[in-house]
Image (cartoon, grey):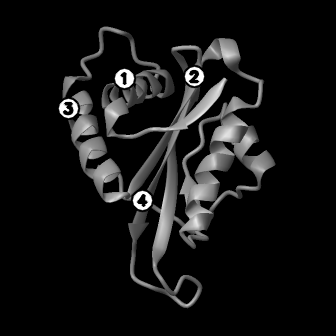
Amino acid sequence: MRFEKAGREQMEELVKTRIQVLRAANQLSAAADMGQTEQESRSYYEKSLRDGSHVAYLVYEGDRIIGTGGISFYQVMPTYHNPTGMKAYIMNMYTDPEYRRKGIAMKTLDLLVQEARERGIHFIALEATSMGRPLYERYGFCRMEDEMYLPE
């Protein structure tokens, strides 16, 4: 098993795994049109991998991708508790069903958290599916109570 930090040369693999993750997380059929999402994902990766605002890992068994994960870095207004305003958001975590419960997601998560820590970022957030929540809680993530969103 190989854990590789992805670069722009892995663009097509990143886009393909992004669509795979979204289909799985949203329980979408293969027939669901993901054309615009695929195009926007490619644009996102092109920009963010170039400027360093996103880091992605791909996990390989031979030539087969069996896992992935990414982290985005962004800045908000500085606060007393976060004087730089820098934050990180973990996303796109996925392990092929055949390879689950083998520590792949935990190692991928650890690599992503290390990326944030190396940049001096201490606020790291994510959205958890019911399947992923136990992993994140074992790692030390806590539920947030004060965050809100405005639905459409």
**Eye-nearest disc, 4 or 1:** 1
Amino acid bearing label 1: Lys
Mark 2 packing: few (<14 Cα in 10 Å), some, or many (20+)? some
Precedes in sequence: disc 2 or disc 1: 1
Residue identified by numbered label 3 = 39
**Eye-nearest disc, 2 or 1:** 2
Precedes in sequence: disc 3 or disc 2: 3
Q: CA distance from mark 4 to mark 3?
A: 26 Å
Precedes in sequence: disc 2 or disc 4: 2
Residue identified by numbered label 4 = 149
Precedes in sequence: disc 4 or disc 3: 3
Q: Residue at x 36, y 9 (%)?
A: 30
Amino acid bearing label 3: Gln
Q: CA distance from mark 4 to mark 1?
A: 29 Å
Q: Position of residue 21 (x, y in %)?
A: 46, 27
Element at badge 4?
loop
Amino acid bearing label 2: Tyr
Element at badge 3?
helix
**Eye-nearest disc, 2 or 4:** 2
Left or right of 80 on screen, residue 151: left
Residue identified by numbered label 2 = 60
Q: CA distance from mark 2 to mark 4?
A: 36 Å
Element at badge 2?
strand
Q: Nearer the viewer, residue 23 or 17?
A: 17
Q: CA distance from mark 2 to mark 1?
A: 14 Å
Q: Position of residue 52 (x, y in %)?
A: 37, 57
Residue identified by numbered label 1 = 16
Precedes in sequence: disc 4 or disc 1: 1
Q: Position of residue 22 (x, y in %)?
A: 42, 28
Q: Residue at x 25, y 50 (%)?
A: 47
Does 139 sit above or below residue 28? below
Amino acid bearing label 4: Tyr
